[in-house]
Image (cartoon, coloured by chain):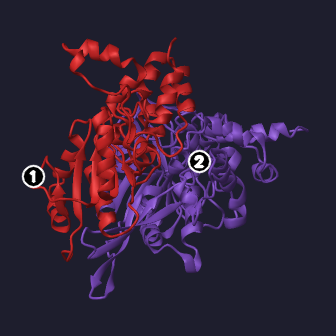
Amino acid sequence: MARAKKPKLAVWKFASCDGCQLSLLDCEDELLAVAANVDIAHFPEATRAVIAGPYDLSLVEGSITTPDDAERIHKIRRRSKRLITIGACATAGGIQALRNFARIDDYINYVYARPEYIDTLAKSTPIHDHVWVDFELRGCPIDRFQLVEVINAFLNERRPNIPRYSQCVECKRSGAVCVMVSRGTLCLGPVTQAGCGNLCPPLGRGCYGCFGPMEAPNTMSLAGWFREKDTSADAVRDLFRTFNAGAAPFRKESEAHEQR
Amino acid sequence: MKPAGSTDPLPAIIDKGGLQVLIDALIGGGFTVIAPRLTDGVIALDTITSVDHLPAGATDEQEAGYYRVHDGGGGRLFDYATTPQGWKRYLYPPEERLWQAKREGAGFAIVEERAPVPRYAFLGVRACDLRAIGILDAVFDHGRSAEPRYVARRDQALIIGVNCTRAGSTCFCTSMGTGPAVGTGADLVLTEFGDDAAPALLVEARSPAGRKVFARLGGRQAAAEDIEAADAAVAKAATMVTRHMATDAAAILKRNLEHREWAKVAQRCLGCANCTLVCPTCFCGSVEDTTDLTGATAARWRRWDSCFTSDFSYIHGGSIRRSGASRYRQWMTHKLSHWWQQFGSSGCVGCGRCITWCPVGIDITEQVRRIKDSEGGPH
């Protein structure tokens, strides 16, 4: 049952690796159903055809890292009825938010042969620092089933079923054995939002925290437990300082273990 | 060991081969046999078809936030304490579609779920876990509000209990009155005793269904010495229990709903929900409605939930239990205290899973003791 008037969908890219928008193309079976129910109006990664705004739904990938982008996101917000950020870059600043813990000029001088050509901001910041965001979809990268669920909920005017509880809930439901308790593996599962599709612990790896902080993360207790079990302060700091290093609870916990 | 006036046959003695006869008889009778099995470095429940799937010689080491399996050598098949999760997931699966709806013109039609009911034989149910199933029965098989899917699975399930002959360090069944000897509700009960390399199994039939399987077992009739040795092995397990729950936990918690310990434990509690999900009696779930992209079909799902998630207490306007302290208190006071008002028993069976599988090792018995000790007076 196709809709008479299809909503216009736009996909926008800021500082990011494109992995999250690729998740939309990765939807395979569901992609045809999505394409049948929305007009893909702006999605350069998929098509050169562009339909002018305004847009009913904008998916925004990437973080704000340049003065130009800090302007551009406002223009996109003005042309979008609903704006959903997709991925750790757009919701927490991404891996590039590691710059937030250092001096930006040090990075530029180290990486680029001609640093004077680089026009960048001192910090990588999430979209919600700049404009109103209607919904944030977590993950590095996002989970394509969650992406379809959010689009689905938008189309059917209902609340998306995107839980904010811990990864542990998914492990226990699936019957995966806790790697922390049964192997002593460092795992961010107890403080990380579920949603990745239970990728690491069933394979014997601790959770890397790709989906960012869960609803009420007690990072201090978890980090304290790791420290008691002879994990170095540096290792604990690095654990919290990956794709979601800029998310406030993870940022604060990593800073607490910074050796000065 | 044999209650007076019972029509149960005298216990039999079987060996490993005899247990295979039992497994074959169950499979032949249409049962899917679920039993402890060494999987991913833990002794977890799984489907088995052979006695060789049981973790022969394996023992477990459990502490607060710690679990390891060791190869103890020998031939004991049941020489370990509780599995990481109980039997709950078979009777009350973590995720279940309840019904679907299909759009029809301006209205919709309900499509009922008609999945076949699995016929389980649970082999190796410990005393605490059997009591937990009894508690779930009280929760789900409850007159007008019965949960039909649970009841259907439960009605078909055959339970083969195992008396514990070893206690784990997080076990506290003795103070909950639930173990180590298997109580009522089992169809058959096994006790492993004797020689470490080739232990014997004492088998008791305790229900009509159990007697039917028992009749096919063979083996030899148990002698008085066998029964004595089996009883002694179970009695020894009781002496190995080192953790204890305060006997008046319900009353202690009831008069201490405001206590500094709630805030203190919240500093450690991760709110991750592991304790509730491994608890063999925690039964909370939430329902979730899904649609397909076009809105032509919708489905209602039930999933395991937990009082530790903030959505669980979400009503109009927000979550009722906003702090970690209030969520922990809800779990513990329900489990140990107001479960009595609701279902006429404690909700805790002393299996110790919440202690072992708490990633930061919070100990429910210790939490009660801290509150109790703060009250002063003789204890």
Q: Are marks 1 and 2 on the same chain?
A: no
Subunit under mark 1: A
| Residue B215 percent across, percent down from the top left | 42, 63
**Location of residue B183 (image quadrant):** bottom right
A35 or B59, nearer to the observer: A35
Q: CA distance from mark 1 to mark 2?
A: 83 Å
| Residue A195 percent across, percent down from the top left | 36, 48
Quadrant occupied by the C terminus of chain B: top right
The crowd level at tag 1 (other Cα within 10 Å; few <14, some 14-19, many 20+) is few
Which residue corresponds to mark 1? A47
Q: Identify the chain drawn in purple.
A: B
Left or right of A71 in this view: B331: right
Q: Amino acid at mark 2?
A: Ala
Which residue corresponds to mark 2? B224
Number of numbered discs visible in the structure rendering: 2
**Residue at x 40% of width, y 43% of height:** A130
Q: Amino acid at mark 1?
A: Thr
**Location of residue A240 (image quadrant):** top left
